Image (spheres, rainbow, N blue to C red):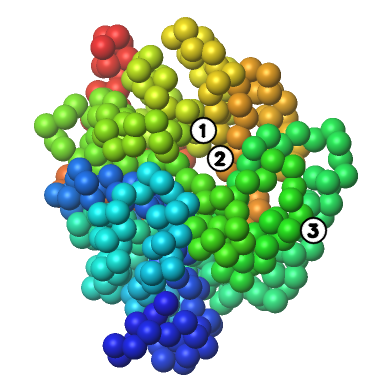
Amino acid sequence: MWEIEGKLTDNPEFVKEYFNLKYLPMTRSLMDQDLYKLSMGQTYHHQFGNLKTTWDFKARNVGENTTHTSVYTDEDKKEINNQLRAYAALRFDEDELQYLNAKCPWIKQDYINFLRFWHPRLEDFQFTTNNKFGNGIMFFGVQEYIEYYEIPVLEIFAEVYYRNHYNYDELLAGFKEKTNEKIAEMKSNKNLHFGTWSEFGARRRLSFEAQDWLIDRLAEEKLPGFIGTSNVLLAKKYNVTPVGTCAHEFIECVGQGNPMYNPAYSNKIAMEAWIKEYGVWNGIWLTDTIGDELCRRDMQKTYATLFSGVRNDSGNPFKWADDWIEHFKSLGIDPKTKTLLFSNSINSLELWSKLCSYVEGRAKPAFGIGTFWSGPQTIDPLNIVAKVVLVNGKDVAKLSDDSGKTMSRSQEYVDYLRRTLDWRLKSDL
């Protein structure tokens, strides 16, 4: 629902005309959002209201000598700015809040009340210029208010680029054709295994229109193992399960954001806060923010018992699975009771099935499938991210287990962080 001149409307055509949009609004609701943003948001609201953060946007494969050679242009910037103006006019409505209350029992009433009055602010955004990819953006403010911007920013930056730099109608037609081919293969090929899976692709989707059509098709087809989507709006619309886990930002903000803490313990500090908030609820932990090895060291028996599983987002997924299965065994925990969730670059049905077969019988295989479902299917998708880079004015970093995914404003801080991690690994503390 949009609030315009003190009145509410749910008419996207009116919003397009009012904000002088070239295209229909690309974010249609404050619930057009990944569920994990709400899970983290409640934790920030209850425990970390004093965090101020700055986020940077980065296009990893846009610019010279990359997949997409056309940089973001001034024309793109104009539409992005107008789309953000429309986004800032969105408000939660009571039907959406009641849905959250009913579908997500770990979300508490005081947080629902907070969301009732929360809304985006255009003044939190600032356009920047980077020679690599042209016009970018950063946003900044109190984390419990601004962390929700990440997904809409990526949705808008992706869709504007695809519409302005390609023949969108051809992309959409190819998207539907390739999606139907995948669905047919999944239904007919009995040799493929998929485990439990959900769609995770809002941040790099071709468009709202494409993801909306996709979830409708997946819900209709009732494919093996499909349970839902991370997009809360579309989960509500098509009566599938909203799905979400913790993200890198939480470990950066909570664990690295206080300079009094040694960042080599940032994973443990963040896990403590998550358990304090949720107990056994919401229990899939992302393992690679500062490296998987230290995460295993931190997830000793109490945490390993409370968390229902772990999520892979970088590194070799087969080795990762072996490492975690052995880790649970070393703690005296049956790994068959734990979920291993794969969410990194699942880019073919064959790889997906191979990973599932590799884990089946040893642990519970699960998958969060993003760009493979929701991104464009006939061109290479954009690789765009928005990451927190400053917390209370201090540098933070996401390292992961893939060197190309490291993101920070300060190489000096990255070097310092790596030294602390190396010290801890060598000292066995």
Q: Quadrant of the C terminus?
A: top left
Residue 318 at least partly seen: no
The x and y percentages for residue 185 are 83, 47
Helix, strand or loop for disc 3:
helix
Q: Amino acid at mark 2?
A: Ser
State the residue position of label 1: 312
Count of all numbered marks drawn on residues in the image: 3
Q: Seen in the image, is 129 located left or right of residue 373?
A: left
Per the model, the C-alpha gap separating discs 1 and 2 is 6 Å
Q: Nearer the viewer, residue 12 or 381?
A: 12
Q: Which is nearer the N-term, disc 3 or disc 2?
A: 3
Q: Which residue is mark 3?
A: 180
Which residue: 88% across, 44% down? Answer: 188
Q: Nearer the viewer, residue 40 or 76?
A: 40
Q: CA distance from mark 3 to mark 2?
A: 22 Å
Q: Residue at x 72, y 26 (%)?
A: 357
Quadrant of the image occupied by residue 412: top left
Q: Earlier in the sequence, mark 1 or mark 3?
A: 3
| Image quadrant assignment for residue 87 | bottom left
Residue beneath disc 2:
343
Mark 3 burial class by Cα count in 10 Å: few <14, some 14-19, many 20+: some
Q: Say if mark 1 contacts mark 2, CB within 8 Å.
A: yes
Is 390 in front, or is 7? 7
Q: Residue at x 44, y 9 (%)?
A: 331
Quarter in which the N terminus is drawn: bottom left
